[in-house]
Structures are given as C-alpha cells and as structure tokens.
Amino acid sequence: MEQQLVFDTQLLTKYDVSGPRYTSYPTAPQFSEDFCEQNYRDSIAESNGDFLARPLSIYIHIPFCNTVCFYCGCNKVVTKDRSKGADYLIRLHKEIAMQAEMFDGDRIVKQIHLGGGTPTFINDPQLTVLMNELHKNFPIAEDDIGEYSIEIDPREANKETIIMLRDIGFNRLSLGVQDLDKSVQLAVNRVQSERETFDIIDAARASNFRSISLDLMYGLPNQSVDSFSRTLDRVIEAKPDRLSLFNYAHMPKLFKPQRRINEVDLPSPSVKMAILKQSIQQLEEAGYIYIGMDHFALPDDELSIAQSEGKLQRNFQGYSTHGDCDLLAMGVTAIGQTHNSFSQNHRNLDDYYAAIDAGHLPIFRGMTLTADDRLRARVIQELICHFRLDFNLISKQFDIDFNEYFSHELTKLLSMEKDGLLQVEANAIEVLPAGRLLIRNICMVFDAYLQKNQQQYSKVI
C-alpha cells in the first residue's frame, strides 16, 4: 500500500495547537442569532429555485442517554425516564412535516443519519414510527442508492434491535466503543463488554448492513500504549469497514461531565502521542487507509473510493459521499446547511418544544455565507478531503486569480513547506505524508475568522 502518513513526533509536537475540525466553514462559533426562521425559509426557496435542485440529506438528533459518559462533549439529556422520548417525538414528527412542506416534492432524500445522544434510547416501535414519518413526508431513494445510518450504543441494543433497524430501512451502523479495557471504561463511566460490542457487529453482518463503523478514542484515563494496542487488535479482528480514532480533548471548563475524570489518570502528552503512533501503524498494517481527520476505512469502502476519485466531501456528519445534498437538520441543537446558509435549532428542550408548539421552525441561529465564505469553504474542503488543491480549478469556479487572492496565505504556508508538511507548486498545493495528520493546521491558514474570534477548540493531535 502506498505510504499515506509520516509520523514525525517533533513536527506533531510543534504544531499541536488548538483549532477547528472544519465540519463546516465558517465554523459554528461564527453563527449569529440574527439569522432567523425567515432567513432559513428564504434559503430553502432559493435552493428550490436552482436550475438543478440538489437532493436532500436528513440528520435527526435524539439527545437522550440513560447514563453519562464522563468524556462526552455532545449535546445530550441524561435521564432514565423513557417517557421523555415520547414527548420529544411528538415535536420531532411535527418538525418533519413542517420541513417537508417547504421543499419541492421531487427532491429525493439520498442520506439519513440518526445521531445523539443515543438514538436507541427510544424503543423499537418508536423508531419504526419515526422512519414511517420520514417516508410519509419525503421521497426517499431506494436502499441500493441511499445511505441510511444510525448511531448505536451496544448497551442499548440486541440482535432483535439490529434486525428491526434493517427492516425499517437502515443500511449502515456506527457503534460507540472508545476502549475495551475495563479500567478505562470504569474511569469514564462507560462499562461495555466485548460481547455486547461484537454481538452487535455479528448481528449487523447477518442482517446485511452495507457498512459498519466503530468509534475509538485515545487519551482517556488509564490508557497505555499496550492496553490500547490490545483494544485495537481485537477491533481489527472484527474488521469494521470504517474506524474513527478520536483524540480525547479534556476541556472540563466547557463540559461538566469531564470534571469527574481524575486528571492524574490521563496519559501524558508523550504517552498519548505514542498511542496514536502505534495505532496508526496497526491500522495501516491491517490494510486501512487514512481518509483524514481521525478517519480510516478499508480500500473497498465508499469513503476510500470517493477519495481516490476526487469526490469525497465533508459536512457536519464528518466525511461523506453525499456532499451534493442540502442537509436538513431536525431535532434539538441540530445543524443543517441549505443553499448558501447554515442553521442551528434551539439547544435546549424547553425552547425547542416552545417553538414547535407555537407552529414555528425551531431555528436558533445561523448565517448566510458571503462570496468569500463560499470560496474559502471550497479551499478547505479540497484540502481536508483530498490533500491537494488545484489553483486553476478554484480560480475558474470563483472567477479569481488564486495567487493574487491568497497571496498572504501562500506566504504563511512557506514555513510549513520548509517543515515538509506540504509542497506549493506553480498551480497547486500538495499535502505531503508528514502533513496529513496536521491537515487542520494547514486549513487554518485559510480561515478568515480564526484570528478575529478566538474560540476554545480542541488540540489537533
């Protein structure tokens, strides 16, 4: 396999600063509450009016978990009261209907993703009704065309659940694992047996799910190189189609559950770096391809194929093969993208319920992108998905002279070029193997907001 990465500890340490993950550009901290429901409706009307109306992708956020994982920085509601799911679904069904009314009926849904929280907090009949509501309100592509995924907590599911999910239309699963080591699990309050995890994988394969993805996390308390290597060996045996290897960002001032983690149990920066290096080596030896930004995939996975064909995209769900879609986001705190705008729903249940009950879309904030935003978003998208940027392509699409427009940025890249992260050619930027783990740093050079609005982001490594 062609070498994809060079792990240079000195360079990684030098560039280990805080920065955005670029699931969007501009990033969510730039959203404004001046963007309202009417702005969102106007954006959809413009999108419907395009000569070639884009297909649709739907993200639905189910915020509930019955226990809190101490590392978690997601928007969630921790409760053991399952009736809260029913109250939430009443509003969610209303939002689905309100959203559907605004889109032309011939715009096909090619992608659905249920995230959380834990979507399987709601029971099997409730999930079935939810999918029925989507089918009732939107034209949805056939199973062999569309990508329909759901995040699973193996502690909240069994074989019957997996069979049911496939029956109602899901064809991809994403499983939270983080680490199989018992001492790590106890330290982060997520005790999950190997059997629970791998029984779900077996059931998904038996039910003909098209893709299985596992989430792992390095930098958690009590982790060591050896312990995490054992977890990864076991995971590789199961051969998931995709793997995410996330960096645990310890930010207790922002995320209250993290205050329950004992900081003295966290691996040192040098151990954390060694865990990452060992993990990359194991995954590459097992045949996984580094897609970028913590993501690995087998060579025959759609992400790997899309990247090799120059068609990979990135959005709020991470890397995607359906970047040609307008993204509808439904549920509390969900973020979407339609036409040239971003929008986010209310971030707490009371405000979300109040808006829906009053017959309004629950838009909390967002932004309409400027011409410069769209240009820089395309530049960052190309770099973060394909590790290469063609100046002529960008110049032609946006009617600019790339070298002139980005003269300041190209000058800033000279130090990175000297360090061997990239190569600036006459008409392109090529990210080198030593720079691929630092792609966030390279993208940050083109971020016009980063210096204007300092935000607290996670470290890049």
Image (cartoon, helix red, strand yellow):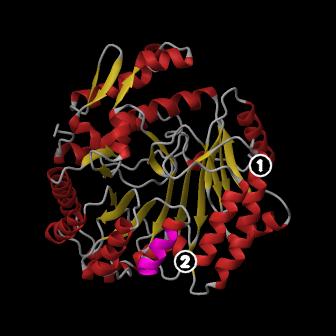
SS under mark 2: helix
The main secondary structure of the magenta stretch is: helix
Magenta stretch holds residue 164: yes
Measured from the top left, where is residue 166 in percent x and y?
A: 49, 66
**Residue that label 1 marks:** 36
Q: Residues within 10 Å of mark 1 (few under 14, many from 20)?
A: some
Front position in the image: 109 or 41: 109
Residue at 36 percent of width and 15 percent of height:
427
Q: Amino acid at mark 1?
A: Cys
Q: How many marks?
A: 2
**Residue that label 2 marks:** 121
Measured from the top left, where is residue 338 in percent x and y?
A: 66, 41
Measured from the top left, where is residue 420 in percent x and y?
A: 21, 31
From which residue to which does the magenta span run? 155-165
Question: For this view, does 294 lie left or right of residue 407?
Answer: left
Q: Vertically, is 15 above or below 399? A: below
